[in-house]
Amino acid sequence: MRVALFVTCLVDAVRPEIGFSTLKLLESAGCEVVVPEGQTCCGQPAYNSGDSATARALAEKVLREFDGFEYVVIPSGSCGGQIKHQYLELFRDHPDLKSQAESLAS
């Protein structure tokens, strides 16, 4: 099974061992793990501070980077929640992007 790993900004900056442990666990389960190189942030800090434009731009970037993966593993509940719930809100007036967000959320 081919899965994408979203290494959150918190994991990257504060607890990289979480990312390495997640990678090891997935590989030991037989997964082929892809870590898109350009990934940065899900946009949650911007969203939570009311900066919808920045949050939307980061969300669009995430949608592009993780498009086409059947599974995306996110070792952070808050980032997963942002992608699963707030992306739908961010793109409520953009049908194509909302559809992509729904696909990623599922």
Image (tube, rainbow, N blue to C red):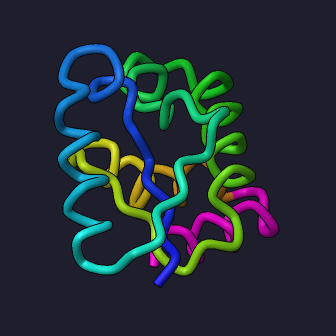
Magenta-colored stretch includes residue 48: no
Residue 37 is drawn in which quadrant?
top right
Q: Position of residue 88 (x, y in %)?
A: 54, 60
Task: State how many labels appear.
Answer: 0
Q: Which residue does the image show at 55% across and 69% down from the upper left?
A: 104
Q: Position of residue 72 (x, y in %)?
A: 45, 65
Q: Which residue does the image show at 67% across and 65% down from the upper left?
A: 98
Q: Which residue does the image show at 69% across and 64% down from the upper left?
A: 67
Placement of 28 over or under 34, stated as above or below: below
Q: Position of residue 91 (x, y in %)?
A: 66, 54
Residue nearer the viewer, 64 or 11: 11
The C terminus lies in which quarter of the figure?
A: bottom left
Magenta highlight range: 93-106
Question: Could you tell whether 57 is left or right of 102 in the image?
Answer: right
Placement of 26 over or under 47, stated as above or below: below
Placement of 60 over or under 69, stated as above or below: above
Q: Which residue does the image show at 61% across and 46% down from the upper left?
A: 36
Question: Could you tell whether 46 is left or right of 81 in the image?
Answer: right
Magenta-colored stretch includes residue 104: yes
Q: Position of residue 70 (x, y in %)?
A: 55, 80
Per the picture, the main secondary structure of the magenta-coloured stretch is helix
Residue 25 is drawn in which quadrant?
bottom left
Question: Could you tell whether 37 is left or right of 17 in the image?
Answer: right
